[in-house]
């Protein structure tokens, strides 16, 4: 599955979902297709889902909220693991991704 | 209405301080796409200035970009339908980026905003951020309000001040948001 626009691209490879570009959508509704892709990966009942955010240069607060909600959903399910990979090259990630781990301590967060 | 919240702007604040001004109105309208475009431009301009002053250009670019974009998104989301211009002013001095965003808001919108501001400025931002995220995940849409500001306060150490004033009944409320970010 893939979502591609002039500004960003989201695609899955097995149970890993990759994000790249700039995501500054105006509302939860606009993020719905991305949320649907993430839900579809979950429906495949993987043991663990990995989010690769290393190529995601800019993200607005609605976008951060999308990842937070997904983290909470996985936490509440209890039957699937979650990994998040960020990059020290992208400053927002070292600043804001640790909040996901506060929401879900079992999250495997790697900022490389 | 005449109310202030948060950290007041510096006492030296005057109109001459600002080194850039952007006004979105008329032919350059206050539309969503212009938030990111303005954020990209100001991020790039001031990252270069920060680098010339010995700072980290990448950190500066990203921090300024996120701050400008969030404040402009809020201004555009909540602006008055008739008096819909959005103004942005910015400067970088002694390693601190400052921005002021000015927009009008309908009185009922401004009143709701006052409630949000009272909470934003009265609680620990880190605690409130996680609380709001959890509430939003439970379907409480009001939980999403202020997430951008809380992220900037908690994750970036940004400081904010707001001033809301309605000078006469013929015009909506004038909302000024002032923020400073140490790069």
Image: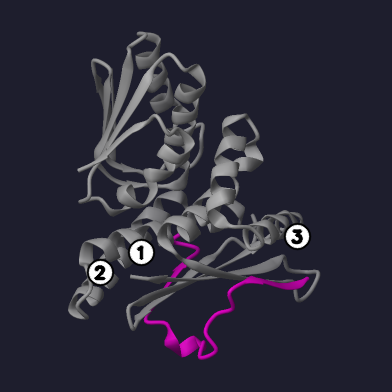
Range covered by the magenta-colored residues: B1-29
Q: Work out whether mark 2 precedes mark 1 in sequence or the reverse, and give the earlier one.
A: 2
- Cα gap from disc 2 to disc 1, whole angstroms: 8 Å
The quadrant where residue B105 appears: bottom right
Q: Work out whether mark 1 precedes mark 3 in sequence or the reverse, and give the earlier one.
A: 1
Q: Which mark is residue B64?
A: 1
Disc 1: host chain = B
The quadrant where residue A42 appears: top left
Q: Which colouring convention does the figure follow?
A: one colour
Q: Secondary structure at mark 2?
A: helix
* Residue A20 makes an appearance in the image: no
Q: Position of residue B47 (x, y in %)?
A: 25, 69
Q: Is residue B32 above or below residue A3?
A: below
Quadrant of the image containing the C terminus of chain B? bottom left
Q: Which mark is residue B47?
A: 2
Q: Nearer the viewer, mark 1 or mark 3?
A: 1
Q: Work out whether mark 2 precedes mark 3 in sequence or the reverse, and give the earlier one.
A: 2
Instruction: Give neighbour class at mark 2: few <14, some 14-19, many 20+ (Cα, 10 Å).
Output: many
Q: Residue at x 20, y 51 (%)?
A: A89
Residue holding disc 3: B107
Q: Secondary structure at mark 1?
A: helix
Q: In the image, are marks 1 and 3 on the same chain?
A: yes
Q: Residue at x 70, y 67 (%)?
A: B173
């Amino acid at each position: 599955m893939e979502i591609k626009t002039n500004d960003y691209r989201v695609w899955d490879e097995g149970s890993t979902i990759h994000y790249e570009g700039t995501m500054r959508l105006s509302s939860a509704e606009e993020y719905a297709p991305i949320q649907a892709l993430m839900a579809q990966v979950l429906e495949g009942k993987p043991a663990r889902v990995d989010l690769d955010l290393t190529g995601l240069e800019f993200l607005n607060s609605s976008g951060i909220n999308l990842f937070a909600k997904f983290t909470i959903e996985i936490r509440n399910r209890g039957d699937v693991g979650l990994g998040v990979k960020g990059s020290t090259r992208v400053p927002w990630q070292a600043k804001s991704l640790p909040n996901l781990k506060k929401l879900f301590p079992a999250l495997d967060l790697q900022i490389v | 209405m005449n109310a202030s919240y948060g950290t007041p702007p510096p006492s030296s604040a005057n109109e001459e301080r600002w080194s850039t001004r952007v006004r979105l109105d008329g032919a350059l309208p206050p539309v969503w796409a212009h938030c990111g475009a303005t954020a990209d431009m100001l991020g790039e301009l001031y990252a270069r200035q920060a680098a010339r002053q010995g700072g980290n250009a990448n950190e500066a670019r990203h921090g300024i970009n996120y701050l400008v974009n969030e404040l402009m998104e809020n201004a555009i989301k909540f602006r008055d339908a008739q008096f819909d211009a959005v103004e942005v002013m910015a400067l970088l001095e002694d390693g601190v980026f400052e921005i002021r965003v000015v927009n009008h808001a309908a009185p009922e919108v401004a009143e709701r905003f006052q409630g949000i501001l009272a909470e934003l400025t009265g609680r620990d931002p880190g605690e409130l951020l996680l609380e709001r995220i959890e509430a939003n995940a439970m379907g409480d849409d009001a939980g999403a309000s202020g997430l951008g500001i809380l992220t900037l306060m908690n994750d970036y150490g940004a400081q904010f001040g707001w001033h809301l004033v309605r000078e006469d009944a013929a015009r909506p409320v004038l909302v000024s948001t002032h923020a400073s970010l140490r790069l």
